[in-house]
Amino acid sequence: MEFDNAVSGRIYINGEITDAAVGIEHGRIKAIKKHIPGAKDYGERLILPARVDPHVHFRDPGFTEKEDFFTGTLSAVFGAVSCVLDMPNTSPFLYRYHAFEEKEHTASKKAVIDYGLITGIRNRILEEKVLKRSPALKIYMAETTGGVVNDLDDLALQYLLNMMKDYEKPVIFHAEDPKFMKKGEEKSLKEHLKNRPDIAEESAVKRLIKTGKPLHIAHVSSKDGAELLKNKTDGQTAEVSPHHLFLTLDSEFENPAYGKVNPPLRTKADRDALWDALRDGRIDMVSSDHAPHTIDEKEEFETSPSGIPGVETALPLMLAAVKNGLLDFKRAVEALIENPANKFCPQKGSIEVGKDADFIIIDMKDIRKIRAEDLHSKAGWTPFEGMDAIFPSSVYVRGNEIIKNGNFEGKKGFGRNLWMIKSAGHNRHS
């Protein structure tokens, strides 16, 4: 049997690392065998599924001085990501079909990897035409970058969740309760936390879990929020972002505003509780919540917008954490790769026949220090400067080696909106 392409080596399949070869045809995994003649052999390096990042803000259109769909997806693929889900708080805010068309037109010409465009709600307006072409719906329970707040009483919340179950689309919540938030002066991370206290997250998470409906809670950041996740019901999932796992309000930054983010960085006790919840499965997955701003915007803490770039460093940081004994390897693969794909993009996230041929090549001995000058986001800075990381040497997307020996071999426009293909009634794998 001949293939378009084939790779071999130590491959992660069904929770185990095994010596095998994968045959690729038309961008999909066609066969898994002990040996395939002519397969590119990666020797002792690991071949893992590439990552789906379900939470990024690529700022395009409207804020392209911060990031755009080319630099965002370029940064993503260098960080082992083959598919991203972009949030709706661009300009215009994505909830009307004309805004969707504009954003899709832009993304389709720039993306180097696959993607989906998440829709939102504004003024309680949700357009079905957009929803059908989106991987999920995002609800902002509290104000953050972009200024949109979805004020839903309990009846409206239940109605929305019942409706979305019929559409079979995940609903993602930014879970902070505005009742407990303040608009006081903030010139430090401690004052930012005072304005967005733990109780704001606790109240929102408790309310969401109490619905008993399928939903997804973004960027859990507090000990109290993590504790409540033990009460999740079927179909309820939660994520954590690396900045809440690796940083606290007491971390040292080149510029304190580099740590300003929503929800805020909290205490060491909160950080430790998040690691515990990730290890035991209360937190299902890791997302980057990549939210870049320019260095100039971050200059003054009080006026600085909230947000941290991280799509390129999420998996590398977590793999180094595995190496340093903070997380089991199998659990890391589940949280970083398998669970995000299963929830949002099931054609990716595992090496099995019929799935997209998206792979990353990893040498677990190749630990490097993160340096902003080596990264590819327009932001030009990182709060993880100097931290240990394990970056992929090669990344395949639909059988194409986009990153080869650390160099970019892809092109603009290669990435596909997978939900546009699905909504058009085409085979998503074609």
Image: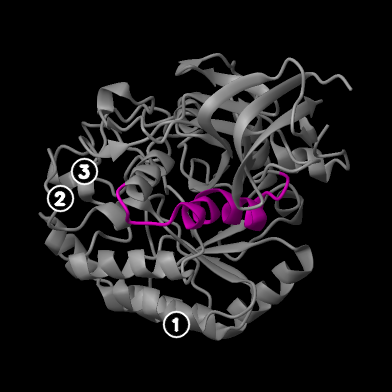
Which amino acid type corresponds to the residue marked 1 in the rendered image? Lys
Q: Is residue 402 magenta?
A: no
Q: Pointer 2: residues within 10 angstroms few (<14), some, or many (20+)? A: some
**Residue that numbered label 3 is attached to:** 258
Image: 36 above or below 316: above
Under circle 2, the secondary element is loop
Residue at 55% of width from left, 66% of height from top? 216
Q: Nearer the viewer, residue 407 or 424?
A: 407
Does residue 111 show up? no
- Mark 1 or 3, nearer chain start: 1
Under circle 1, the secondary element is helix
Task: Specify the principal SS of the magenta part.
Answer: helix
Q: Nearer the viewer, residue 305 or 11?
A: 11
Q: Nearer the viewer, residue 405 or 227?
A: 405
Q: Quadrant of residue 131?
A: bottom right
**Residue that numbered label 1 is attached to:** 206
- Mark 2 or 1, nearer chain start: 1
Q: Which residues are magenta?
A: 324-347
Q: Nearer the viewer, residue 241 or 357?
A: 357
Measured in 3D between alpha carbons, the distance from the residue under mark 1 to the one under mark 3, in whole angstroms, is 29 Å
In the rendered structure, the answer to whether residue 211 lies left or right of residue 98 reads: left
- Mark 3 or 2, nearer chain start: 3
Query: Which numbered disc, 3 or 2, marks the residue closer to the eye?
Result: 3
Which amino acid type corresponds to the residue marked 2 in the rendered image? Glu
Which numbered circle lies on residue 302? 2
